[in-house]
Amino acid sequence: MKLQENEFAPYYANYIIKSLLHTDILEGLKKQQDAVVSFFTSLPSDKLEYQYQTGKWTPKDILLHLNDAERIFAYRALRISRNDQTPLSGFEEDDYVPFGNANVRSIENLIDEYVSIRNATITLFKNFSEEDLMRIGIASNASVSVRAIGYIILGHELHHMSVIKERYL
């Protein structure tokens, strides 16, 4: 079933479009997990802390950001699926990354964290009913459905993986 415009903010449209390559959220989450782990384990060590421009994130920073964002998106999906009508605040990603200390952590540690978070997200989405997936709440001052959050997680990750491939390698 096609996502409706009232299920996500225009800001997320690019992520949604990218993620619709995966028609099934669970299948997409599983495939992406394997691809991301393989990608980051294959990166040469000199690229892990590389910045293509001063002030830009490193690939390790990006992986940390993916971890943080997925946690937040999954939390939103959980609350909305449980019919919590409390508007959920946004977050400023640029404020999070410096405090995550990604570049003093090993890539193995960041990947382990990623796998743990992704497995939890897969389990969460596996247990949503069709009704849960269609439920709409408010996050970052905009309407969003639980299923749109699943596609946003997928598209957000695809976006950042493309950035790494285009600008860092």
Image: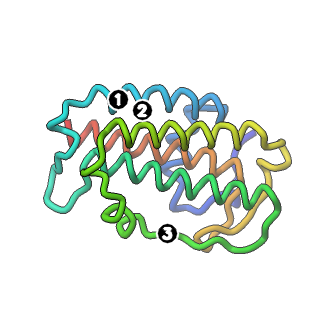
**Which x, y percent locates residue 49?**
20, 46
Quarter-of-image position of residue 2: top right
Answer with left or right where residue 95 lies relative to residue 75: left
Q: How far apart, in angstroms, are the residues tagged by discs 3 and 1?
A: 27 Å
Q: Pick whichever of labels 3 and 1 is earlier in the sequence.
A: 1
Q: Amino acid at mark 3?
A: Phe
Badge 1 marks a residue whose secondary structure is: helix
Q: What colour-coding does the image apply?
A: rainbow
Q: CA distance from mark 2 to mark 1?
A: 5 Å
Camera-nearest residue between 34 and 158: 34
Which of the numbered marks, if any, corresponds to residue 39? 1
How many numbered marks appear?
A: 3
Q: Are marks 3 and 2 in contact (CB under 8 Å)?
A: no
Residue holding disc 3: 91
Give how far across and how far down residue 153 sits, in percent: 55, 47
Element class at badge 2: helix
Say which residue appears at 55% left-offset and 44% top-offset.
117
What label sits on residue 36 in the rendered view?
A: 2
Circle on res. 68: none
The type of residue carrying mark 2 is: Val
Quadrant of the image for the C terminus? top left
- Residue 70 % position (x, y): 53, 50
